[in-house]
Image: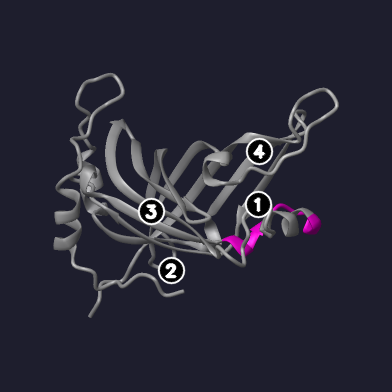
Amino acid sequence: MNLFSRSTSRRAVANAASEVPPARATSGAVAVPDTGLAALTGEWIVDPAHSRIGFSVRHAMVSTVRGAFTEFESRLYFDGRDPRRSRAEVVLSTASVQTGVEQRDDHLMGREFLDARTYPHIRFTSTAVELAGPDVYRMIGDLTIRDITRPVVLELTYIGYVTDPFGYQRAGFDGTTTINRSEWGLTYNARLAEGGALVSEKVRLQFDIAAIRTVPAA
């Protein structure tokens, strides 16, 4: 997949973000971005080798199954001066889901869950970003699974920024949200003798992101 072009106009990004509602803190006061983050303004991508886009779900009411999508593409635009102008798009390959058990992975890729042959991608596209507090961002966006699109809210924590020994500029973010999978058509389940469900309706999505600044187009 080659979904993103590094030559996308930043003016277009700014125009698209101009309708985003003002940033606000969780306490109701206006949050002010750290002036040191201005240097991070620009386009970034998620480094697949050092990032994890995963999930966890309760199984049989007594254990937790964890998995991740190992193939994805991304595009990020971060504005350290005005977080409202930041945006993100991430596209996952549904056939890349891995939980450590091949039989379970096949089931997840099958028609009862993700139906990877019919719906090869899961997509998240941000629609607004708010500064919720020191180093904490609230990213609102559209999550599409099985061609069903619904809004979600990610809580993102800024971890830090470094230049690695190879000269790459890196920034780290951790994010999470919880969804009800049935809202995206993932309704498969089996009942337990005790009356509970084999697979929880609630799924926690986890984003452990190491982002790399893209090289400006020549």
Q: Which mark is residue 196?
A: none
Q: Secondary structure at mark 4?
A: strand
- Magenta run includes residue 195: no
Q: Nearer the viewer, mark 4 or mark 2?
A: 4
Q: Of marks 1 and 4, which one's residue comes earlier in the chain?
A: 4
Which span is picked out in magenta? Answer: 94-103
Query: Within 10 Å of the Cα at label 3, are there few (<14), some (14-19), or many (20+) other Cα atoms?
Result: few
Task: Measure how far apart labels 4 and 3 are at the Cα level.
Answer: 33 Å
Type of amino acid at the residue the image marks with label 3: Val
Residue most toward the top? 27
Q: Secondary structure at mark 1?
A: loop
Where residue 181 sits: x, y (%)? Answer: 57, 41
Which residue, given by chain and number where applicable, does mark 4 sit on? Answer: 57
Q: Of marks 1 and 3, which one's residue comes earlier in the chain?
A: 1
Where residue 111 sits: x, y (%)? Answer: 67, 57
Q: Of marks 4 and 2, which one's residue comes earlier in the chain?
A: 4
At horizontal 55% and vertical 62% (from top left) the residue drawn is 119
Which residue, given by chain and number where applicable, does mark 3 sit on? Answer: 162
Which residue, given by chain and number where applicable, does mark 2 sit on? Answer: 166
